Image: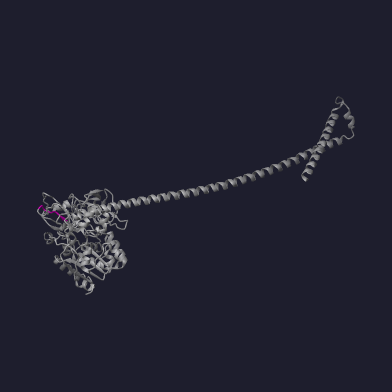
Amino acid sequence: MKRWQKIRNGIINSFKGGIFPKENKESSSKTLSAKEYIPSRLVLPLLQHSGSPAEVLVKEGQHVKAYEPLTRPKLKYQVPIHAPVSGTIESISMQNIAHPSGLKEPCIVLISDPEDKQEKMEHPKFENFEEQSVETLLKHINDMGVAGLGGAGFPTEIKLRSSVSKNHCELLIVNGAECEPYITCDDRLMQERSDQIAIGIKILQYILKPKYTVIAIEANKREAMTTLNKAIIDNDVANTRITELPVKYPSGAARNLIKLITDIEIPYSARSTDYGVVVHNVSTIYSIAEAVTKGIPLVKRLVTITGQALDVNENCWTYIGTSIKELILKHGYTKQKFPRIIVGGPMMGFTLHQADVPIIKTISCVIAPSDKELVTNKITVNCIRCGRCAKVCPSRLVPYELYGYCLNEKHGKALNSGLKSCIECGSCSYVCPSAIQLVAEFRKAKAQIKAEKAKENKLRVTQSRFETKKTRIAEEERQRALRKAEALRKAKLLKEQNDAKKLEEAKNKEATVQVQAQAENVNTNTLKNNEIEKVKETTSNVSTLNIEEILAKPNSELTPEEKELKKKYALQKAMELKAQREAQKNADNSKKETK
């Protein structure tokens, strides 16, 4: 039988490893989900998904409406968060969050308005989504803050766009396995909101255009299968079937689910979209339907509140940011001798350092176990190399070998042995007879590797910035030198022009002086000639007089007229002599120039 025939007929394959822990689902799976309530104070971490936090849009003291965006994405792997209820921003500060490290992260603290004064912000809704473009729907899904609710918190729009860009989606798998013990929120969601899930499947079929759709549900959820099957028929969801899975942990892991449905084993170095398969959790699909058809952002989710330390075990619609401490007290928590609050299930979850931390988008379960319910921890002893962990590992790893590498901080060898392929399902720790906390050590090693990588990236960025700075400084120096050389060239050219101008001015001035001198000489000669002519005229007027007699007489005997005449005669003779000398001098100069 061909693969597609097996898929359409619901024939199940198997995956390596796996375990069969006690389910403990009965206490919370039989009752209807409780309606959400408005807490007086909400703490909203900026980072509730895989990626980086978005830009904060609000400030302290600002009043916001329900569904109003509090952050705005600017980068690719960013998802906005919205105000679950209307209220006032108390602070934007570091707050305790649900994390194994117990560290604080930036959060927006919102003080809620009274229930009778709640205001809501309207968002676009597309009841006839087939009339919208795929791009419009993808952008709207991201604007509504939808991220994966199965645990990883991967941005839904990025996951969908990856498949749309490749135009290669052959199979859409709706993950309703919910294999983790204690957790029943997906089971109740499929029973109570099956019509919206069916609409969400139709939206994904419109976006991805798969050849076929499989809704995978474990065999212990008969009511969910019946209800969802009816919803598929009523809403005319085409090319879709429900496939019953065997009750085996961890069948809900994406790669194990693909192996069960298609018998395709996806390498951990590849994505399922590379093989034409897209997997989405039922809670995520429900949130997509709410966002697209009703314009409701992801501000609440269904959470399983369970454990023998509580009076009431149920699934409760919970606003994002609600305190876990407030939730368990509301469900009748009785303090135990050894109190523990577990978030996310007993296999893949973790124990909180304190209970006063907020519910976020990826939290599906809160367990408050009693002292009797807790398994007494055995004393950890050395590994006996029994190989049980390797037999149950669904990722085909050798956990005891990885443990040795991680314990001795041989991270290179750990990575080569497949540390990144570990899905942290906890199967190895569950079967270990030496009570070794294998998964805890793997998580620690992954965190160390991540920190080292972040340090290396930071160093690389610093070096890159330093090299860029050096290049920039060198370029600035080069440009400065070019500008200086250009300035010197211009200064030199300007100086040469000024010198030439001054030289020209000097020549012009000298020529002007020469011309003026020549003009003065001409004027002087003219004046002299005029004086000579006047003297000649004077002397010619007294030509009748005997000059020689006048010259022979002594001055004492001369009359005033004779004295004046004698003076003029002497002047005439002197001027004639001077003129003769100058003429002789000019003649000599002319001869020299000619030679």
Q: Position of residue 177 (x, y in %)?
A: 18, 64
State whether residue 214 is above or below residue 340: below
Question: Quadrant of residue 417 in the image?
Answer: bottom left
The residue located at (32%, 65%) in the rendering is 165
Picture quarter containing residue 266?
Answer: bottom left
Residue 196 seen in this snapshot: no
Q: Is residue 172 left or right of residue 32?
A: right
Please name the residue shown 69% across and 41% down the image.
513
Residue stretch in magenta: 366-371
Position above or below: 594 against 67: above
Q: In this view of the protein, which residue sits in the foreground, 138 or 24? A: 24
Residue 71 appears in the rendering: yes
Counting from the top left corner in percent of width and height, residue 92 is at: 26, 49
In percent of width and height, residue 429 lies at 17, 57
Q: Position of residue 403 (x, y in %)?
A: 21, 55
Q: Is residue 87 magenta?
A: no
On-image quarter of the C terminus: top right
Farthest-out residue, left: 372
Q: How many marks?
A: 0
Q: Is residue 512 left or right of residue 187?
A: right
Q: How is the image coloured?
A: one colour
Q: Nearer the viewer, residue 449 or 326?
A: 449
Work out which residue is located at the far bottom of the displayed protein and give it. Answer: 1
Principal secondary structure, stretch drawn in magenta: loop
Q: Residue furthest top?
A: 556
Quadrant position of the N terminus in the picture = bottom left
Dividing the picture into quadrants, the one containing residue 297 is bottom left
Nearest to the observer: residue 201 or residue 489: 489
Q: Is residue 370 magenta?
A: yes
